[in-house]
Amino acid sequence: MATTAGRPGTTATGRRAARRLELLMCSPEHFTVSYEINPWMDAATDVDTGRALAQWTALRRTFERLGHGVRVLPGLPGLPDMVYAANGALVAAQGSVGVRFAHPERAGEAEAYARWLEDAGLGPVHRPEHVNEGEGDLLVVGEHLLAGHGFRTELAAHREVEAVLGRPVTSLRLVDPRFYHLDTALTVLDDDPEHPDVAWFPGAFDEESRGVLETLFPRGLRTDEETARVLGMNAVSDGRHVVLSPRAQRYAAQLAERGYEPVPVDLSELLRGGGGAKCCVLVLRR
C-alpha cells in the first residue's frame, strides 16, 4: 500500500486505507440486565430486548455495508452478556486463546465461544488457567499485543498469553472502575504494523502505563473525560471507518481531523450492560 509522507496510514490519494475485517457477533435474544458486575449495570432498570436486537442488527448491517465479513453465534438462555462477543476469546495469527471470566455469572460463555471457534477451524483454543476476558483486555495493534489488568484480566494471564502465542505482551494497568476493560479506554484505530495507531483516555491508566503508551504511540490520539464516559472509546476501526457511539461527538470530530471516517451507530440499549460497538464484535484473525 502506498502511503503519503504527511499522514501514516493514508494512500497515495490522501485517503486512509480500510482493511476487510472478519468478525464474530452474538445475537442478543436473551440480553437483559439481571445482575450487576460493572458500574454501568443497574438490575432495577427495565431493558427492552427487542430494541437491543434492533440496534445490534443495525450494527451488523453497518459492518456488512462497509464490506466486512460477519458470522453470528446464537445467544444462549441464561447468558445475557454473551452479546459482548469481544470477551469470548483472542484470535491472533499465532493461535486462539479462550477466556476465563472473573465473575461466575459469565462463566458459561467461555466454552460456548471456544467450541464455536474450533468448529469454525480457528482452533485449537487454549483454555486458560488465569482469568482473562478476551479482546476486552487483549488488543492487537500491529506488532504490539496490549493487555489490560486491574479489574478483570489478571496480570498472570498476560504471561500465559505470551507463552501460548509466542509473542510479547505489553501490560497496562487500568485504575478507573468505569473503564474495567482495556477496550473501554483505548481504540485500535489502525493495526497495520507499518503505522499502528490508537486513541486512548489517559485518565483510565496509571502513570507508568501512560508512559508506556506515550512511548509506543507518540502520535496516538488522546481523548477526554467527555468521550470516555459515554464509552466513546469502545469503537471498531478498519483503518479508515470508525464505528462508534453517536454520543461521542467530540471524538468523532477528532477522528475526522486525522482523516478517519466516523460511523455512528446507536447502541444505547446495549450500553445498559456496559458495552458498545467494540464489545459486540470479536475479530477473527488468521
Image (cartoon, rainbow, N blue to C red):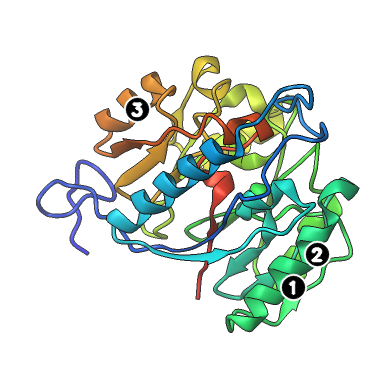
The furthest residue to the top: 226
Q: Earlier in the sequence, mark 3 or mark 2?
A: 2
Q: Earlier in the sequence, mark 3 or mark 1?
A: 1
Q: Quadrant of the N terminus?
A: bottom left
Looking at the rendered structure, which numbered label has been put on residue 164? Answer: 1
Residue 196 appears in view: yes
Q: Nearer the viewer, residue 55 or 89?
A: 55
Q: Nearer the viewer, residue 276 or 34?
A: 34
Q: Are marks 2 and 1 in contact (CB under 8 Å)?
A: yes
**What is the x, y in percent for residue 47?**
65, 31
Name the residue at 66% across, 62% down: 168
Q: Are marks 3 and 1 in contact (CB under 8 Å)?
A: no
Number of marks in picture:
3
In front: label 3 or label 1: 3
Left or right, 203 with reference to 281: right
Q: Secondary structure at mark 2?
A: helix
Q: Which residue is mark 2?
A: 160
Left or right, 2 with reference to 169: left
Looking at the rendered structure, which numbered label has been put on residue 182? Answer: none
**What is the x, y in percent for residue 21?**
40, 62
**What is the x, y in percent for residue 150?**
80, 37
Q: In this picture, is 231 found above or below 110?
A: above
Looking at the rendered structure, which numbered label has been put on residue 252? Answer: 3
Task: Identify which amino acid the numbered label 2 is placed on.
Answer: Glu
Task: Identify which amino acid the numbered label 1 is placed on.
Answer: Val
Left or right, 113 with reference to 277: right
Task: Identify which amino acid the numbered label 3 is placed on.
Answer: Ala
Alpha-carbon distance for marks 3 and 2? 36 Å
